[in-house]
Amino acid sequence: MALFSHLPTLLGYIFILVIVIFFHELGHFLAGRWCGAKIDAFSVGFGPELFAYTDRKGTRWRVAAVPLGGYVKFHGDADGVSAALEADPDVASVDRSDTFAGKSAWQRGVVVAAGPIASFLLAIVIFAGLFSFQGVGVLAPKVGSVVPESAAARSGFQPGDQIRAINGESIESFTDMQRIVSASGDVQIAVDVERAGALVHILATPERKDVKGQFGTSRIGVLGLGASTDPADFSNRRLGGGESVREAFKECWYVISRTTSYLGGLLIGRETVAQLSGPVRMVEVTDTVVRLGFAAVLNLAAFFSVSIGFFNLLPIPPLDGGRLLFCLIEGVLGRPVSHRTQEFGFRIGLAVVAALMLCATFNDLSRFFVS
């Protein structure tokens, strides 16, 4: 019985992984076909093959037992598109014109970049679809309460204040305000509020605090403002096609900007690796989201698709961004980066990625056992 109680979470987890992985690799696949490269295999997952079929062009489409990744294997390559930059030297009978390595630098760059681009497009389609069919809940940017002795109280905020802009950026909802504040811990912001018909300018510095939310604890900027509880200040807006796509782009950009801000803070010591999460944490989040319904599962899939697209664009071999960097250098120099340099870069990059994954997994397990 306990196993069946966790079945919705397991199915939701697999659904999210499969859809996100499939579309990312589909980007590589379609770009590879467009560039004329022969493709031996398209795999969702690693390890033993569960089921597969071979199409008329010789590509074997397979689903493997471990759905924690995937790959597109080009003809003559030692591994998938995310592994080798050169054709396998052990395959002597390969026609180089059919291989990924035999294509020009710009063609290889297109193939490599197509994976992250497909991830972003998937997220945009999901977000836009949800905004169109489900609508967007909008909570007016009105201060309902001010926490005593908080940064907001010290800065002079008052209940009833209507927040109009932060750092010159127009604020349309309480969520807009929260997102800017959460990313501005220990950084002064300029807030324009409307109070009794007059515009008031307030300088405030959100405090960086550990805040426990629906999906765990995060270290974010906090002012100490509570939203209005008046039902009249909440509305649900149905968006048209163009507006829903525009909002989808904004949602993707928010995920990217927050991730960039975190990584930048990590490099300068302002953030810690304690907030990194891995597969175990993803299961916990999926368990929470599954209870909220299918739309919430799709929303989480879009979030992970953006995250995977962005992560893969980091200029670290063997990620797509590292491979794209090698293609760019080759295009500028007019010759490929030496195999020795590529191999060295791959080893260093692999060590960095492995360290991040180990750290994320350790954080996941630590939270699991502490809780």
Image (cartoon, rainbow, N blue to C red):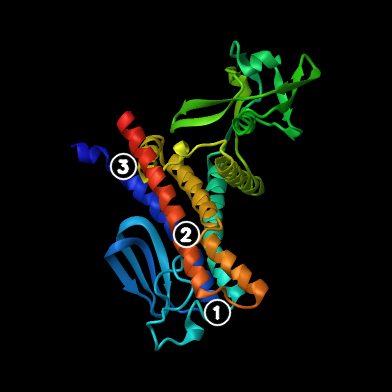
Secondary structure beneath label 2: helix
Circles 2 and 1: CB distance less than 8 Å?
A: no
Q: CA distance from mark 2 to mark 1?
A: 26 Å
Q: Which mark is residue 8?
A: 3
Crowdedness near tag 1: few (<14), some (14–19) or many (≥20) residues, C-alpha within 10 Å:
some
Mark 2 highlights which residue? 348
Q: Residue at x 51, y 69 (%)?
A: 342
Crowdedness near tag 2: few (<14), some (14–19) or many (≥20) residues, C-alpha within 10 Å:
some
Circles 1 and 3: CB distance less than 8 Å?
A: no
Crowdedness near tag 3: few (<14), some (14–19) or many (≥20) residues, C-alpha within 10 Å:
some
Amino acid under label 1? Lys
Q: Which mark is residue 33?
A: none
Q: Position of residue 127 (x, y in %)?
A: 55, 46
Mark 1 highlights which residue? 103
Disc 3 or 2, which lies upstream in sequence?
A: 3
Nearer the camera: disc 3 or disc 2: 2
Q: Residue at x 35, y 50 (%)?
A: 14
Q: Nearer the viewer, residue 339 or 366?
A: 339
Q: Position of residue 241 (x, y in %)?
A: 63, 49
Disc 1 or 3, which lies upstream in sequence?
A: 3
Amino acid under label 2? Ile
